[in-house]
Image: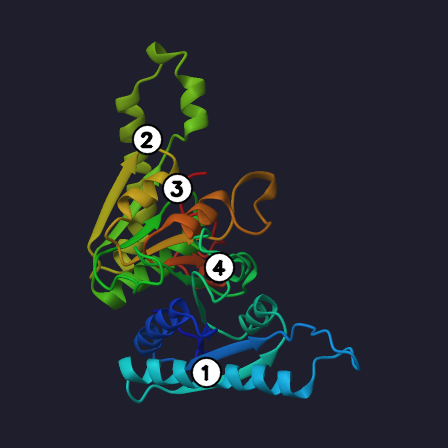
């Protein structure tokens, strides 16, 4: 498993059940990586109307800071309960949670966050901080999902990764193979080759398309892309899946029952370098297990040595 010596696994803490599930997941991941766990809480003091001063009264500031310390203590206890003896540090920051966490990813090997924090809208499946961190973090980011609101994430099942058939998905593949190897579980490599927009265009010429030939060609493409990783991780059972489907739909379908889905951080086309691609965003909002967004840094240690893109054709 890729591990930069001394760099921690970082977790955002806000007192929510979702954050505590993220802490427990991250503690186990830190143990697998032989890394320390760093728990962060960001306090953003909301201005309070006061007849004699503009800044919040001292009592309010102290109460907010004390609440943050309490949540960090609670999170530390949760981490040590699942991994006794783990090296755990805490830090209380002033500022916006997204900004603080993104800055911390410069020196982290992995960042972990619950899908929804305190104060989030019940109708939203993933919080704004999680989306921002996944889009702009500087290391791989894992957002902890579960099948029920504020439920515990699954700990069984395979690791699922999207493969788009190009050298740009090396980062996601490396991360996924490492995670599958560390957990001693199968890896499901999902490759899609026809999205809904293309299907609509091709439907008017059904007699000119040899679908069986296309399917075999895409299966061959996936097999070729996996050769180097199979050789590097011979202990990992690989289950290749090639389907004519949208990448996000295929990953959600084959990710049912998985313990982790891995995608790339970037989309394709003119906006490939901006934020998250459509597949990553869809997975973050709709997956029922943790979703890892593999960053470019992972690709530097990958088999192919290329930057990563969407884990799936998009």
Closer to us: 21 or 262:
21
Residue 257 seen in the figure: yes
- From the viewer's perspective, tell me whether residue 90 is left or right of residue 231: right
Could you tell me which residue is drawn at 38 percent across and 80 percent down? 35
Find disc 4 in the rendering and name its residue: 295
Badge 1: few (under 14), some or many (20 or more) residues near its Cα, within 10 Å?
many
Whether 307 is drawn above or below 216: the answer is below
State which quarter of the image contains the N terminus.
bottom left
Find disc 3 in the rendering and name its residue: 248
Closer to us: 43 or 156:
43
Dot 3 and dot 1 residues touching (CB under 8 Å): no
What's the distance in space between the residues labelled 3 and 4, CA to CA? 18 Å
Find disc 2 in the rendering and name its residue: 244
Q: Determine the secondary structure under disc 2.
A: loop
* N-term mark: 4 or 1: 1
Dot 4 and dot 2 residues touching (CB under 8 Å): no
Could you tell me which residue is drawn at 45 percent across and 72 percent down? 109
Whether 216 is drawn above or below 61: the answer is above
Give the farthest residue toward the right. Answer: 52
Could you tell me residue 296's position as x and y percent?
Answer: 50, 59
Could you tell me which residue is drawn at 57 percent across and 60 percent down? 136
What's the distance in space between the residues labelled 4 and 2, CA to CA? 27 Å
Find disc 1 in the rendering and name its residue: 72
């Amino acid at each position: 498993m890729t591990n930069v010596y001394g760099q921690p696994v970082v977790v955002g803490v806000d007192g929510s059940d979702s954050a505590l599930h993220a802490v427990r997941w991250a503690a186990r991941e830190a143990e697998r990586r032989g890394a320390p766990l760093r728990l962060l809480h960001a306090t953003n003091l909301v201005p309070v109307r006061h007849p004699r001063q503009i800044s919040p009264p001292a009592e309010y500031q102290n109460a907010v800071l004390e609440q943050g310390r309490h949540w960090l203590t609670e999170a530390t206890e949760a981490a040590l309960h699942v991994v006794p003896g783990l090296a755990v540090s805490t830090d209380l920051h002033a500022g916006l949670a997204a900004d603080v966490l993104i800055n911390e990813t410069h020196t982290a090997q992995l960042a972990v966050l619950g899908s929804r924090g305190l104060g989030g809208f019940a109708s939203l499946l993933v919080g704004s901080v999680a989306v921002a961190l996944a889009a702009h973090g500087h290391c791989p980011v894992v957002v902890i999902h579960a099948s029920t609101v504020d439920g515990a994430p699954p700990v069984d099942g395979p690791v699922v990764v999207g493969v788009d058939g190009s050298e740009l998905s090396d980062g996601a593949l490396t991360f996924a193979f490492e995670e599958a190897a560390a957990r001693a579980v199968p890896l499901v490599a999902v490759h899609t080759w026809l999205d809904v927009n293309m299907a609509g265009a091709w439907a008017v010429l059904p007699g000119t398309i040899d679908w069986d030939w296309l399917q075999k060609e895409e299966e061959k493409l996936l097999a070729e892309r996996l050769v180097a990783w199979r050789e590097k991780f011979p202990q990992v059972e690989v289950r290749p899946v090639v389907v004519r489907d949208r990448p996000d739909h295929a990953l959600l379908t084959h990710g049912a029952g998985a313990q982790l889905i891995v995608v790339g951080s970037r989309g394709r086309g003119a906006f490939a370098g901006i934020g998250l691609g459509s597949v990553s965003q869809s997975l973050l909002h709709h997956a029922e297990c943790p979703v890892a967004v593999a960053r470019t840094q992972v690709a530097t240690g990958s088999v192919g040595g290329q930057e990563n893109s969407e884990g799936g054709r998009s």
